[in-house]
Image: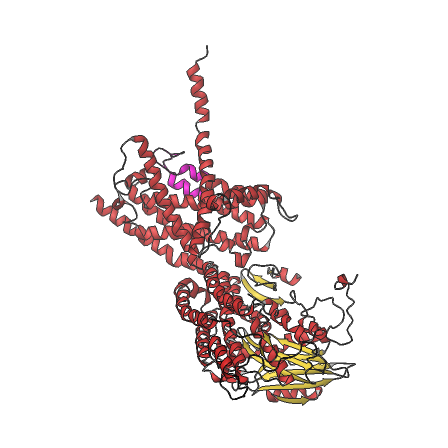
Amino acid sequence: MIENLIKKDMLINVGPQHPSTHGVLRLIMTLEGEIIRDTKPVIGYLHRGKEKLAESRSYTQYLPMVDRVDYLSSFFYQAAYCYAVEEIAGLKVPKRAEYIRLITMEFNRIASHLLWLGSFLLDLGATSPLFYVFREREEIVTLFEELTGQRMMYNFYTFGGVKKDFPDGWIAKALDLCKKMPALFDEYEAIITKNPIFLERTKDIGVMTPKLGIDYGITGPNIRASGVDLDLRKSSPYSVYGELDVKPCLAQSGDSYDRYIVRIAEMRESIRLIEEAIEKIPGGIPERLRVKKVNCGCNQDECQHCGFDMQLVGKKVNPIVFKPPVGEATSMIESPRGITLCYIVSNGTNKPYRVKWRTPSFSSVQVLPELVKDKNYSDLMPIFGSLDVVLPEVDR
Amino acid sequence: MQVIEVKPENILETVNSLKKEFDMLISVLGTDMQEYYEIVYHLLSTSSSKKLMLKAKLNKNNPEIDSLSEIYSAANWHERETYDLLGINFKNHPEMERILLPIDWKGHPLRKNYINNDERLCWNER
Amino acid sequence: MFDLSFTLNDIFAFIWPVIPFIGVAALLVFVVIFLVLMERKVLAWLTIRKGPNRVGPGGWLQTFADAIKLLFKEDIMSSETNKILFTLAPIVVFAPVMVIYGLMPFTEHLVAINLAVGLFLVFALSSLTTVGIVLAGWSSNNKYSLLGGMRSAAQAISYEIPLVIAVLSIAVLAGSLNMIDIVKAQGGGIFTWNMWPAFIGFIVLFICCIAEVNRIPFDLPEAESELVSGYNTEYSGMKFALFFLAEYAAMFIISVLIVTLFLGGYTSPLGFYLTQIPALIHIEQAFWLVAKVYTIIFTIIWIRATLPRLRADQLMAFSWKFLLPMALGNLVIVSVIKFLGQL
């Protein structure tokens, strides 16, 4: 403190309540004029003890809580948890269920990126994009509501599958939305991508070199903007991503602008993936599946319409006596913000012995001091905003 | 996923030799295994997406292991979190203090013998 | 003994200077209340929302409700503030804006103080506002407020210069600093407006005026995502309302200024008045002025809905490296045009 006073530096406390910390992050900053000399992030204001809570709940009871780790990409956290439990319990997931998971996850990725886009531009001072993204997000959320009954915390996946099939007409609506979306992305690009002020604010700001990013464990779009082709959907496919053609969305320089470009490209890519998945989904649209099932009734595994792959839940688990065998499992999936890791240790009871969440935002906050060092204080917002940090995810 | 068991003393050497291929540290976590503390490192290769799990068993009375923060910067916060929640000491760590819980918190919640007697949390039992 | 007419004259002479100020104050409050509503409605329209639609028919009374709320709010002053300066700051911000209202010609005869150097006084007064903002920033004893105040000072200094140089070209064109004279010189319809010979100056002035009233993309002193709310972070209740009032009043008056200097002021763009009766001509003049002013204001709101915010150093660079040379070049062009016209 005294040292700071001598150097005429200003100690400024950004947060925990501050409009652009996306929740309750606290940054203790030393400013010299308006130049940031030192940053110390303080986290933990949203710590809800998700890992401790798992110890006293059965596997199924813990499932809805997983949604709350990151409220913007609930499906991904459910998926990570389900994959880990399924690996311990040795449950096989029907292919149709996997496709439903994939389609909902990709829609969720778009919704998450859209909200990021709005809040990022809001950080830069442009208010309109926030309202425009909510227009599209609303349609995705409406689709989710129709499917799961919830608008935010879906609680839709179960161990060994999903809870129910698409309702009648859902696939048609989803396809309609997929057709509409690219034109809307063009609209954003028209207002944002070539805006000279936006370019001034984000180009060459917060450059993350591949070395720095890898050293700090940055994953997801943030590292792909630096030119590192790390996408688990492609390199180690977990769901049925292996059957689809996932194209990498890369940029080279790793500045805030590239992180924006990568996310926009990823949204377009997600739409393509959804369309491809809807084409390939076994059984096709639910109405036809139902009719065929009535007619079929052969109960053979190889049958095109009533085999294991057509089901939604492979092996229904009893919520109370579901006891996976002793063991441990790790699942890593590519969430909108990066690699989400779920590590579960089971001791043979119906409660998980240890659940660990590794969240991508945690690393993004850790790297922030490196990125904002010796930058203008105004650059904090384009840098921090472009990292797409969701604070509940950091603190768990 | 490949699993390698290491002795706590050899962790630095092992990781140093692995660093070339597995250039990203995904997470550091600890588990209270009743008789010992187990510490798990998840490593990932960004070029080939190969995953690796390193495990080390720590003595229950004096859980101590060398910090990896010199090798991977990412280890800094993950190790702080492990210290915070499980009370494992990382030697030569630049700032070994709590990260998620308040700085004046007592005890380490993820230890199985942890009894929550903090008055701030007992509001529903009073 | 008593001369009744003298007494009446005396009373009249005493009251007469006060009347315009009462009129100005009433106009100001009315304008601000309408402007806030307009901004919210237009922004809502541009961002596919409904905007205020609960208080009164179609939400038209929303601003009255807001104003009443602000009046009744508790006036919080933190213990570490400099009490005198903290109280003084909103007044210092508000008072010059109010005086400028008296200097503006709203119609040919509706100008409260018609000075020979009206234009000069307008710019002298408008730069006083910055003092108030710096005072507010400093006396709040809040680091965000201080940063906001400092930014405001830096911004005002760098934008005042191209602004004044752009206005100089008008003085050259009109050959006068009197506002009425400036308007009368462009009374012959849309093609006699100063906008055409001094087009670059018009653009420069427009940009500088947006910066002067701290609107997006130049709203750095109150950049909410960086400085919480900038210089007025610590203010509440009526003191905050004064800042708010001053901001919107300044936005209106700066639009009047742009219109007066470049777009023919209260004169008709057609070159002749639609009505011939003198009393109606006044109303028509007011109508033309208001129409032009609200076009400008709509543009400012439109810009706010479109653009993100600049960074402090980019803002300075833009002013010194781009606007200042443009303004100087404009002055040269206008002088040459004027010189050729006199030959």
Comparing C226 with A30, the one in front is C226
Q: Does the magenta segment cover residue C105?
A: yes
Q: Looking at the picture, how far across and down is residue A19, in whole percent?
A: 56, 59
Res. B44 image quadrant: bottom right
Q: Is residue A116 visible?
A: no
Q: Does the magenta segment cover residue C172?
A: no
Q: Looking at the picture, how far across and down is residue A320, in whole percent?
A: 70, 76
What are the residue bounds of the magenta stretch?
A: C98-125
At 53% from the left and 56% from the top, the residue drawn is: C224
Considering only vertical position in the picture, is C110 above or below A351?
above
Which quarter of the rendered picture does the C terminus of chain C lie within?
top left
Comparing A307 with B125, the one in front is A307
Comparing B111 with C218, the one in front is B111
Q: Is residue A40 left or right of residue A106?
A: right
Find the residue positioned furthest to the left: C343
Q: Is residue A130 visible?
A: yes
Considering only vertical position in the picture, is C72 above or below A381?
above
Q: Looking at the picture, how far across and down is residue A74, in whole percent?
A: 57, 71
Find the residue positioned furthest to the top: C1
Comparing A73 with C271, the one in front is A73
Q: Looking at the picture, how far across and down is residue B123, in whole percent?
A: 76, 61
Considering only vertical position in the picture, is A32 above or below C339?
below
At 53% from the left and 59% from the top, the residue drawn is: C226
